[in-house]
Image (spheres, rainbow, N blue to C red):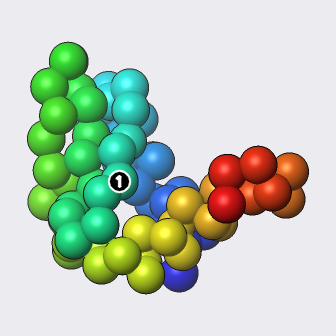
């Protein structure tokens, strides 16, 4: 789920001209577009397990060792 989900989210962010994607448990992903953080309405709120799943899918082993 996490890889395909993030790829789709990143593609949407690029199309919208967003510069950042923010994740927070129990919230929809937030996109920073033209300086404003807005929820990505096409995504459901991600619980803490799904949020961690997405984040871990973006990290390499070295990053996991440092940050986890």
Q: Which residue is drawn at 30% across and 78% down?
A: 47
- Image coordinates of residue 30 in percent, x first then y, are 24, 47
**Left or right: 26 with respect to 13?**
left
- Image coordinates of residue 3 in percent, x first then y, are 60, 68
Q: Name the residue under label 1.
A: 23
Of residues 16 and 20, the one drawn nearer to the viewer in this rendering: 20
**Left or right: 62 with respect to 2?**
right
Q: State which quadrant residue 65 falls in.
A: bottom right
Q: Residue at x 14, y 25 (%)?
A: 36
- SS at badge 1: loop
Q: Is residue 4 visible from the viewing direction of this image? A: no
Q: Residue at x 29, y 67 (%)?
A: 25
The local crowd at label 1, few if under 14, some if 14 to 19, many if 20 or more residues have their Cα within 10 Å, is: some
- Image coordinates of residue 16 in percent, x first then y, are 28, 34
Vertical side of 63 occupied by 13: above or below: above
**Left or right: 67 with respect to 33?**
right
Q: Which residue is drawn at 55% across and 61% down?
A: 55
Q: State which quadrant residue 8 falls in.
A: bottom left
**Left or right: 31 with respect to 9?**
left
Of residues 4 and 27, the one drawn nearer to the viewer in this rendering: 27
């Amino acid at each position: 789920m996490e890889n395909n989900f993030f790829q789709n989210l990143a593609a949407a962010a690029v199309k919208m001209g967003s510069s950042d994607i923010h994740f927070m448990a129990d919230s929809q992903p937030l996109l920073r577009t033209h300086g404003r953080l807005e929820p990505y309405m096409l995504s459901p709120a991600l619980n803490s397990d799904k949020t961690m799943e997405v984040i871990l899918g973006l990290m390499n082993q070295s990053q996991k060792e440092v940050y986890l």
